[in-house]
Amino acid sequence: MRTIRPNSLATFVVVLFGIALFYWGTDGFTAYTAESARVNRLLEARPTFPADTTFEDSKGRTYSISEFADKYVFMTFFYSTCSTVCVQLEGNMARVFDTLPAEQRGREIVFLSVSFDPQRDDPARLEEYRTFFDSDGETWRMARISDPNELDSLLKEFGVIVIPDESGGFAHNSAFYLVDPDGKLVDVMDYTRPEEAADKVVRLLAEETGRDDR
Amino acid sequence: MKQSLYGLALFVLLALPPVAGLMESLMIAHMHMQMPLLVLSGFLMAKYGEIRFTRFWETWNVNGIPGILMFAIVAAYWMLPRAMDEALASSGMEAFKFLSLSLLCGVPLRNSWSKIDFAAKGTVLVVFALLFAALGLLYVIAPVQLCNNYVLLEQIALGWGFLTTAFFMVVFIIYHWFTRPASG
């Protein structure tokens, strides 16, 4: 009996260590991938969209985020030569867009697809690309950020990781980003679940209207 | 003693920035070469620890269960997609990876494997085979990128690596079963 005791104690300590290690490594069993940890951190930090970022959209117009003052902005980050994830990302964005009532689109919420490949995604290319997803270029705009410094700081602020690969493409993480009328990031949603994202947006807009009526 | 030196040499080699950089540039090499080699370096270095701290092991790891649990927990931790990403993102996590896989994984494995009985060995093998198969399927089937630092194709390669390892573990488990001691 005496010989087994330190051994049992050691077993107990090791199990405790294991629980602590996994608890610490997954932020209390909530984030098993770096992506979910990133989203959790973003939702806590709620960064503000950098006011000095200049978009250039598919119509060649340039403006900053203040263009969308008093509106929600539903945002994605993509590049047009991407043949895999971005197609699904933008396709699902179209599904969210179609779910919302037409009278809200453009008035209370604007959809914005931001390209992180300004070299290739010039206004002409974006103008062509938007038609693939039936984006009207107005209530759902596609734009690039031409200034590399502005682009980098935005990607960093919103935690978008973009890694160029050997074949001229990019590896990148994807999500739906929702920026509120004050320019604050309020939600980061799973882009593979457009129904859930649409429900959330509908609920949020209804709350907002309720508040305005009062 | 010689073994421990080989282990230390292997550890130092793996820690050299060009070697570490090369291995970490490929997801499958990161998880299926660098990490097991770190465990191996600890396994070899354990010889020194066993001679130097005989009493410690005799007192705290009598039946090998604490040691093998430690091995399993740390090994499982490093299979989390997030752990792998964080090792690439921060040097603190990278250092923790090197130290934990060699000292907390390889060392206790050496001391415990010979102590645990047939059933416990079988349990460890089956658990890891199941874990590898599950992770393999996850990495192959997952439509989304689980690791921010690696592209999807590398993730699928890693998945097949896991499945292959799981397959050979099953073969080994069958072998383990047929060569079981007559009394057990």
Image (cartoon, coloured by chain):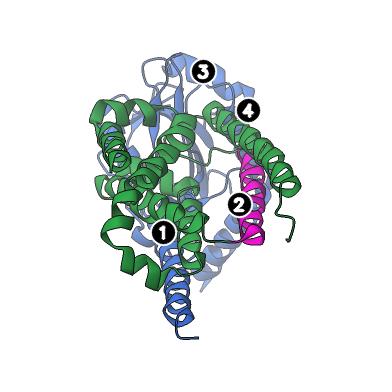
Question: Pointers 3 and 1 in contact (CB under 8 A)?
Answer: no
Name the tint of chain B in the rendering.
Answer: green
Q: Amino acid at mark 3?
A: Thr
Whether residue A142 is visible to the viewer of this picture, yes or no, is no
Q: Amino acid at mark 4?
A: Phe
Q: Quadrant of residue B12?
A: top left
Whole-percent x, y for residue B37 in the image: 41, 37
Q: Nearer the viewer, residue B167 or A124?
A: B167
Between marks 1 and 2 in the image, the one whose residue lies nearer the viewer: 1
Residues in magenta, as a range: B117-139
- Label 2: element kind: helix
Q: Residues within 10 Å of mark 4 (few under 14, many from 20)?
A: some
Cα separation between marks 1 and 2: 28 Å
Q: Which residue is mark 3?
A: A81
Q: Amino acid at mark 1?
A: Gly
Cα separation between marks 4 and 1: 40 Å
User: Residue B117 bears which disc, if any?
Assistant: none
Q: Residue at x 56, y 24 (%)?
A: A130
| Chain of the residue under label 2 | A
Q: Is residue B131 magenta?
A: yes
Q: Which residue is mark 2?
A: A197
